[in-house]
């Protein structure tokens, strides 16, 4: 019952007076290093107060894009440190493939990373390391992040009370499914 308790705790947290600040903070750090997608906080907040769903999506979009800009700066200004870290982790070949993918796809890859479950933080720091022209990186982020978060907000508003009941009923199964998917993503990135 770990995830059921976590679900109820998160719903309670969404009603805290600083909930929007927490959401913005999670959105910012998730774009740089935080391993858990910000949608994990957005969804319960939208379920808890559906009338504010688009407000929450706006806050998260702005914070995520700001974090992305910061991540780009880390890749751009600290490239030598980042490359040493990659070498220490024995991932120079992975970085080379990543660079080639960015050279081939550019803004489209930033868009896909910003919209999909692919870790956006890799796109932010990687875009600075390559470097992709900042305006292209920014456009890709501005197009993809709000699209993703507003789609989540819209789906939750559309699903309404029925969706909330379904999530509450299957919170444990959904939680373990998310853990499994995150483990697959981590394994595929590192092996």
Image: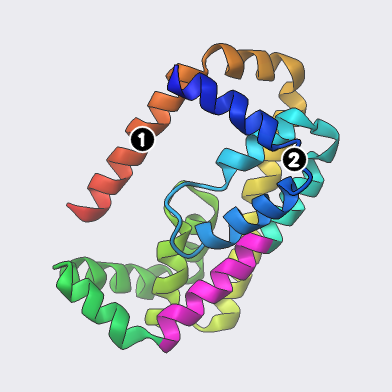
**Identity of the residue drawn at 74% across and 49% down:** 18
Question: Is 47 above or below relative to 76?
Answer: above
Q: Position of residue 92 (x, y in %)?
A: 18, 72
Q: Quadrant of the N terminus?
A: top left
Q: Position of residue 127 (x, y in %)?
A: 44, 75
Using residue 182 as the reference point, say whether residue 114 is left or right of it: right
Instruction: Judge whether residue 74 is colored magenta.
Output: yes
**Identity of the residue drawn at 72% across and 46% down:** 19
Question: Is 108 above or below relative to 21?
Answer: below
Using residue 168 as the reference point, say whether residue 182 is left or right of it: left
**Identity of the residue drawn at 29% across and 87% down:** 80
**Identity of the residue drawn at 71% across and 45% down:** 150
**Residue position marked by numbered label 2 in the rendering:** 16
Q: Position of residue 174 (x, y in %)?
A: 47, 23
Instruction: Judge whether residue 55 is colored magenta.
Output: no
In the rendered image, is residue 146 in sight? no
Label placed on residue 10: none
Direction right: furthest residue = 51
Give SS at disc 2: loop
In the rendered image, is residue 51 in sight? yes
Question: Is 134 above or below relative to 10?
Answer: below
Q: Position of residue 14 (x, y in %)?
A: 71, 37
Give SS at disc 1: helix
**Residue position marked by numbered label 1 in the rendering:** 181
Residue 42 or 150: which is nearer the viewer?
Answer: 42
Label whose residue precedes the other's in the sequence (1 or 2): 2
- Which residues, given as a range, are shown in magenta? 63-77
Residue 169 or 14: which is nearer the viewer?
Answer: 14
Question: Is 83 above or below relative to 160?
Answer: below
Badge 1: residue crowd in 10 Å (few <14, some 14–19, many ≥20): few
């Amino acid at each position: 019952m770990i995830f059921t308790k976590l679900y109820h705790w998160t719903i309670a947290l969404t009603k805290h007076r600083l909930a929007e600040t927490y959401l913005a903070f999670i959105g910012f750090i998730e774009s740089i290093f935080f391993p858990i997608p910000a949608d994990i906080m957005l969804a319960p907040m939208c379920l808890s107060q559906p009338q504010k769903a688009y407000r929450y999506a706006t806050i998260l979009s702005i914070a995520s894009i700001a974090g992305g800009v910061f991540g780009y700066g880390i890749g751009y200004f600290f490239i030598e440190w980042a490359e040493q870290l990659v070498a220490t982790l024995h991932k120079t070949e992975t970085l080379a493939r990543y660079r080639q993918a960015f050279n081939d796809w550019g803004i489209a890859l930033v868009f896909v990373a910003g919209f999909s479950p692919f870790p956006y933080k890799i796109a932010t720091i990687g875009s600075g390391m390559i470097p992709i022209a900042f305006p292209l990186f920014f456009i890709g982020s501005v197009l993809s992040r709000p699209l993703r978060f507003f789609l989540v907000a819209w789906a939750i508003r559309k699903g309404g009370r029925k969706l909330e009941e379904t999530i509450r009923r299957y919170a444990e199964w959904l939680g373990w499914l998310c853990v499994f998917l995150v483990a697959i993503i981590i394994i595929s990135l590192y092996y």
